[in-house]
Image (spheres, grey):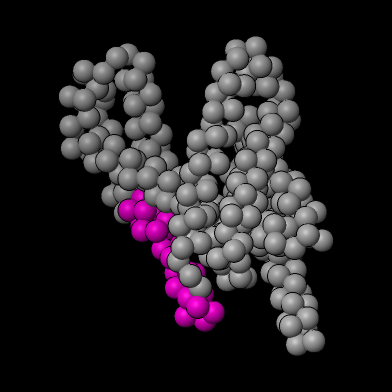
Amino acid sequence: MESVQISGLSIAIMAFAVLFSLALPLVPYFILRKKIKARFVPVLIGAATFIVSALILERIVHGLVLGDANIYAYLMKNPMLYALYAGLMAGLFEESGRFGAFKLMRKKYSTSSDALSYGLGHGGIEAVIVLGLSMVSNIVLSLMANSGALNSTLAVLPAQQKEVLVASVNTLAAAQPAEFFVGMIERVGALAFHVGASVLVYLAATRQASFWLYPLAVLLHLLLDFPAGLFQAGVITSIWLIEAIVIVFSGLVLWFALKLLRAADNRLAVVREE
């Protein structure tokens, strides 16, 4: 391929994004640990639940559904249905995973702080995988392209893989440095949503009268992912609009969830005093 250079500023921002993906869940956790003695085990449970529910089970279903050429073609021709399908699957698998985890955790890890820690683990591992690992891959690709080492790699690859790699490098070269902040903004919103949704599902799993919060969390997850599905289908073309929606929506979900959590804790405190 022709010589392509990725700017040093872009590479620096990508490196910052890797560190950002690690700090995003850890900084809030250590703040919670200092203020309310949050425990780390729920963080690990949240991370493991995301991997099992979203990266394994959900992908198996996607493979079965989208692996059917007719279904895939139909969804691609109907972007609204595709966005609904993607959002619903994410909501069902992740919120069901949360619900099951809190049911298993309730004997040993059933405090409000555990719910918050779980949310940091669930959203944190997603940030590391979606943002951190992808940026590591982009950095390696950028350094190879800038040093000229990429050509020797391309020479031994099959034509299809070569086309994908060349397209990736060209995309990195064409991107403005500021565009690499998009993923970081998205992860802030996503983490806020995961903490909020975790609180809602925690209440649903530990308080019988609050079970309705579980299907609500599924619906909210669908609504969060729906605009992203439209973006992937090409209906919405502005990534900044998508990120604005994610930040505002996630902030509202987190605010609503924390308000319910405080009310539930206050009721529990009154019952104990009586």
Farthest front residue?
Answer: 107
Tell me if residue 79 comes above or below residue 71 in the rendering. below
At 68% from the left edge and 28% from the top edge, which residue is drawn? Answer: 82
Main SS class of the magenta portion in the image: helix
Query: 165 and 263: which one is in front?
Result: 263
Give the total of numbered labels.
Answer: 0
Left or right of 176 on screen, residue 254: right
Q: Where in the figure is residue 175, as x and y percent of width and height? A: 42, 41
Q: Nearer the viewer, residue 7 or 42?
A: 42
Q: Quadrant of the C terminus?
A: bottom right
Magenta part of the chain: 14-37
Q: Is residue 250 above or below residue 63?
A: below
Residue 28 drawn at (x, y percent): 49, 69
Identify the image quadrant of the N terminus. top left
Asked whether residue 180 is in view, the answer is: no
Toward which corner of the image does residue 258 lie, by quadrant? Answer: bottom right
Residue displayed at 58% across by 21% down:
64
Residue toward you, 234 or 63: 63
Q: How far from the left and from the top, in percent, is residue 145?
A: 25, 35
Q: Would you identify the image quadrant in which residue 36 lies?
A: bottom right
Locate residue 222 relative to residue 23 in the image: left or right: right
In the image, residue 54 lies in the stretch drawn in magenta = no
Q: Is residue 203 above or below residue 183?
A: below
- Residue at point 57% right, 59% down? 105
Percent of width and height locating residue 144: 22, 36
Vertical side of 262 occupied by 131: above or below: above
Which residue is at a point 36% across and 50% down the rendered structure image? Answer: 14
Is residue 35 part of the magenta span, yes or no?
Answer: yes
